[in-house]
Image (tube, rainbow, N blue to C red):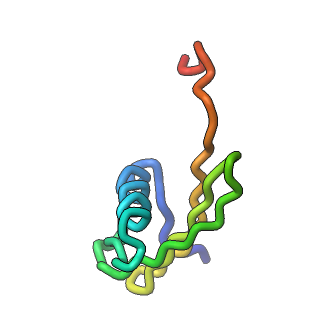
Amino acid sequence: MAGPQITPATMDAALAAIMEWRAAPEVAPVCPLCGAGELGVSDHSARPHSEWYRLVCRSCGLDQMLHVPLGAVVPGGEG
């Protein structure tokens, strides 16, 4: 059975945690699911094409890779 997962509703909080970690990697950010201050973040990116981050929380069991695509916005691609 899969553990807790980042969903569209919690993606903003997950991305904020990644940004906090990138700014201060020595300080563990807060887990976007349970709020525990011990989120483990590791960078598994393949730049310049995409960013991949692994988020692990011992408190709630979160263990997930998040993909953040990089690249130019395609005009007219929003609709």
Residue 6 drawn at (x, y percent): 48, 60
Question: Would you say residue 62 is visible in this rendering?
Answer: no
Q: Residue furthest top?
A: 76
Q: Residue at x 48, y 71 (%)?
A: 4
> Is 51 placed above or below 71 here?
below
Residue 72 vs residue 37, the one in the foreground: 72
How many numbered circles are shown? 0
The quadrant holding residue 74 is top right
Left or right of 44 on screen, residue 28: left
Residue 10 drawn at (x, y percent): 39, 55
Question: Would you say residue 23 is visible in this rendering?
Answer: yes
Which quadrant, please, contains the N terminus? bottom right
> Is 7 placed above or below 3 here?
above
Left or right of 78 on screen, residue 39: left
Which quadrant, please, contains the C terminus? top right
The quadrant holding residue 14 is bottom left
Residue 52 drawn at (x, y percent): 62, 59
> Is 16 placed above or below 42 here?
above
Q: Residue at x 65, y 60 (%)?
A: 45
Residue 62 vs residue 49, the one in the foreground: 49
Q: Residue at x 51, y 71 (%)?
A: 55
Residue 32 drawn at (x, y percent): 36, 65
Left or right of 78 on screen, residue 36: left
Left or right of 78 on screen, residue 30: left
Residue 22 vs residue 35, the one in the foreground: 22
The quadrant holding residue 66 is bottom right
